[in-house]
């Protein structure tokens, strides 16, 4: 076994319940774009709906149509931009679109998006809603880093939409957890559903449970004598007798090159990744000789994706989306337990 990716749908349902409690009377809309942030869109969408999510959200029409085949009934909102050539598929799939210009397609439920500070897609001012408009929305830029700016965005959005009488949604995961005034009628939650912190901290602090567990094993161990090295570029050279474990996971699996220096669990003990991360393998510094087949935990058992993200200087979103769960690289297991 090169590695195993275990997806705990029970944890996802519990995360959905936690977010619903935080939201009070506001609806939870589950964001399952990018293959459910790398966790598997179909499995996670089903678990989110079972956990009380009212709507599914994706980035593209193609993602939405795949979901529609599996889930004929729930509302599905395409958050990203679409082109005129996709409108027919949108109608046939009974999808909802986000409009970022005054060109609103006919016969399709539309969410008008007001740009209140994200500076990407969105209207600078809201037009008079046409009959196709079912909601208005905005996108918060700094709910995870700058609550003052996020509050200013929410205030502008409220002022622009107070008289419309339409459902409103603005909050992402961070705003759901930290900014009560952003919760409005619904919140679009992605990263928190998967038990990952939008703040890069311990998700348990917000009552969230990681959904993904990533494990492997030692393929072999070797003893480096002083002056001997492991991996490309000789980035790790032993200064004393040093046992090294080789784990058959690399950047082709989503374990990035800049994760050298992070820690994994070998036989339940934290051990440092050393040298260059290659396409199919990493080296781990051991304190003793261990047999091939010794368990290695990359994510799980208290070792969080947030820790790896800090070492790589990135965010959990990127790491999760890059883990390769395809059967040619990993064995994927889905657990349905409550």
Image (cartoon, rainbow, N blue to C red):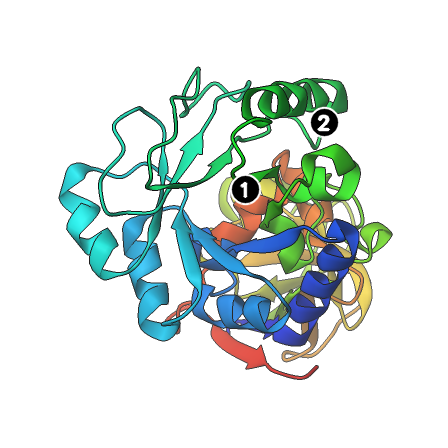
Residue 156 to residue 333: above or below: above
- Mark 1 near mark 2, Cβ–Cβ under 8 Å? no
Residue at image position (13%, 43%) is 85
Residue 122 percent coordinates (x, y):
41, 24
Q: Which type of secondary structure does the marked residue at label 1 adopt?
A: loop
Give the quadrant of residue 271. Answer: bottom right
> Quick check: can you spot residue 230?
no
Query: Which residue sits at x=50%, y=58%?
Result: 55
Q: Which is in the foreground here, disc 1 or disc 2?
A: 1
Numbered-mark total: 2
> Which residue position is annotated with label 1?
167
Q: Which mark is residue 293?
A: none
39 or 121, nearer to the observer: 121
Q: Is residue 79 above or below residue 265?
A: above
Quarter that holds the C terminus = bottom right
Query: Dot 2 corresponds to which residue?
Result: 145
What residue lies at 28% left-to-right and 55% top-to-bottom?
62
Q: Is residue 190 left or right of residue 106?
A: right
Residue 115 drawn above or below residue 321: above
Q: Is residue 232 above or below residue 150?
A: below
Q: Position of residue 186 (x, y in %)?
A: 61, 47
Distance between mark 1 and mark 2 Cα atoms: 26 Å
Residue 237: horizontal and vertical position, in percent? 66, 43
Mark 2, Cα crowd under 10 Å, few <14 / some 14-19 / many 20+, is few
The answer to whether any part of residue 288 appears in the image is yes
Q: Nearer the viewer, residue 25 or 257?
A: 25
Report x, y in % for residue 269: 82, 65
In the image, 153: left or right of 18? left
């Amino acid at each position: 076994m090169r590695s195993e990716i275990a997806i705990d749908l029970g944890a996802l349902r519990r995360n959905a319940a936690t977010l619903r409690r935080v939201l009070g009377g506001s609806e939870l809309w589950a964001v399952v774009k990018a293959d459910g942030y790398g966790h598997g869109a179909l499995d996670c969408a089903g678990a989110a709906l079972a956990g009380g999510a009212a709507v599914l959200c994706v980035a593209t029409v193609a993602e939405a149509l795949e979901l529609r085949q599996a889930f004929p009934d729930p509302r599905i909102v395409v958050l990203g931009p679409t082109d005129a050539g996709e409108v027919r598929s949108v109608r046939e799939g009974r999808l909802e679109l986000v409009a970022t210009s005054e060109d609103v397609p006919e016969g399709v439920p539309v969410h008008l998006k007001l740009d209140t500070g994200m500076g990407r897609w969105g209207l600078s001012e809201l037009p008079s809603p046409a009959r196709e408009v079912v909601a208005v929305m905005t996108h918060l830029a700094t709910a995870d880093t700058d609550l003052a700016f996020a509050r200013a965005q929410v205030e502008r959005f409220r002022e622009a939409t107070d008289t419309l009488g339409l459902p409103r949604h603005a909050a992402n995961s961070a705003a759901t957890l930290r900014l009560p005034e952003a919760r409005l009628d619904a919140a679009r939650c992605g990263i928190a559903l998967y038990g990952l912190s939008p703040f890069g901290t311990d998700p348990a602090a917000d009552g969230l449970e990681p959904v993904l567990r990533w494990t492997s094993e030692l393929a072999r161990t070797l003893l480096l004598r002083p002056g001997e090295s492991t991996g490309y570029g000789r980035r790790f050279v032993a200064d004393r007798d040093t046992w090294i474990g080789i784990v058959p996971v690399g950047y082709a699996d989503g374990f990035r090159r800049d994760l050298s220096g992070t820690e994994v669990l070998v036989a339940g003990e934290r051990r440092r990744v050393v040298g260059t991360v290659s396409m199919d393998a990493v080296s781990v510094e051991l304190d003793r000789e261990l047999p091939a087949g010794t368990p290695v935990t990359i994510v799980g058992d208290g070792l969080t994706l947030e820790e790896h993200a800090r070492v790589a200087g990135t965010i959990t979103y990127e790491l999760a989306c890059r883990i390769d769960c395809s059967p040619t690289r990993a064995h994927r297991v889905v657990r349905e337990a409550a």
